[in-house]
């Protein structure tokens, strides 16, 4: 099992989660974070830290978010996004996007 970053992170990119990850398994793209499933130790400490509830345990993924399991794994495996292990400010427009649903079309830099 792994944890998965979903749609709610796109265009927000809050990084509270990376600050608590004991194994540095988050990777940072231009407007989204992913969890590298090969590094995730299933500790769940990141879940309550996300202010937009974008992180789910694999088995708890809502059906409409299940494609993010594959997306996180593909982006992590591509190795194009750097590991992030320190909190940064969210994206400048985060407040505008935090409650928006269906943001996959806004994902930048995935190139998988």
Image (cartoon, rainbow, N blue to C red):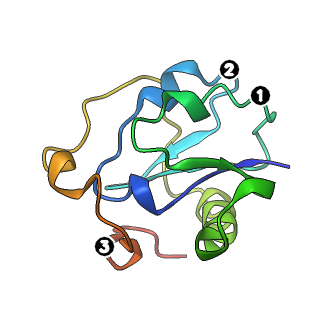
Q: Residue at x 41, y 52 (%)?
A: 9
Q: CA distance from mark 3 to mark 1?
A: 29 Å
Extreme residue toward the right, this view: 1
Secondary-structure class at tag 3? helix
Q: Residue at x 39, y 74 (%)?
A: 102
User: Based on the displayed image, in which of its 4 quarters is residue 105 positioned?
Assistant: bottom left
* Left or right, residue 95 beside residue 83: left
Q: Residue beneath label 2, please?
A: 22
Of mark 2 and mark 3, the one earlier in the sequence is 2
Q: Residue beneath label 3, please?
A: 106
Q: Nearer the viewer, mark 2 or mark 1?
A: 1
Q: Nearer the viewer, residue 94 or 62?
A: 62
Q: Residue beneath label 1, please?
A: 43
Of mark 2 and mark 1, the one earlier in the sequence is 2
* Left or right, residue 40 beside residue 100: right
Secondary-structure class at tag 2? loop
Marks 2 and 1 close (CB-CB < 8 Å): yes
The percent coordinates of residue 12 (x first, y second) are 29, 49
The percent coordinates of residue 33 (x first, y second) are 47, 49
The percent coordinates of residue 3 (x first, y second) are 70, 46
Q: Nearer the viewer, residue 52 or 43?
A: 52
Q: Residue at x 57, y 20 (%)?
A: 20
Of mark 3 and mark 1, the one earlier in the sequence is 1
Q: CA distance from mark 2 to mark 1?
A: 9 Å
Secondary-structure class at tag 1? loop
Q: In this picture, is 5 found above or below 26?
A: below
């Amino acid at each position: 099992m792994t944890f998965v970053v979903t749609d709610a992170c796109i265009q927000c990119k809050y990084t509270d989660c990376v600050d608590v990850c004991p194994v540095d398994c988050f990777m940072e793209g231009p407007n989204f974070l992913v969890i590298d499933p090969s590094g995730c130790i299933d500790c769940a400490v990141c879940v309550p830290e996300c202010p937009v509830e974008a992180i789910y345990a694999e088995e708890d993924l809502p059906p409409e978010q299940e494609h993010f399991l594959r997306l996180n794994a593909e982006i992590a495996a591509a190795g194009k996004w750097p590991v992030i292990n320190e909190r940064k400010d969210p994206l400048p427009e985060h407040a505008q996007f935090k409650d928006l649903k269906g943001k996959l079309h806004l994902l930048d830099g995935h190139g998988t």
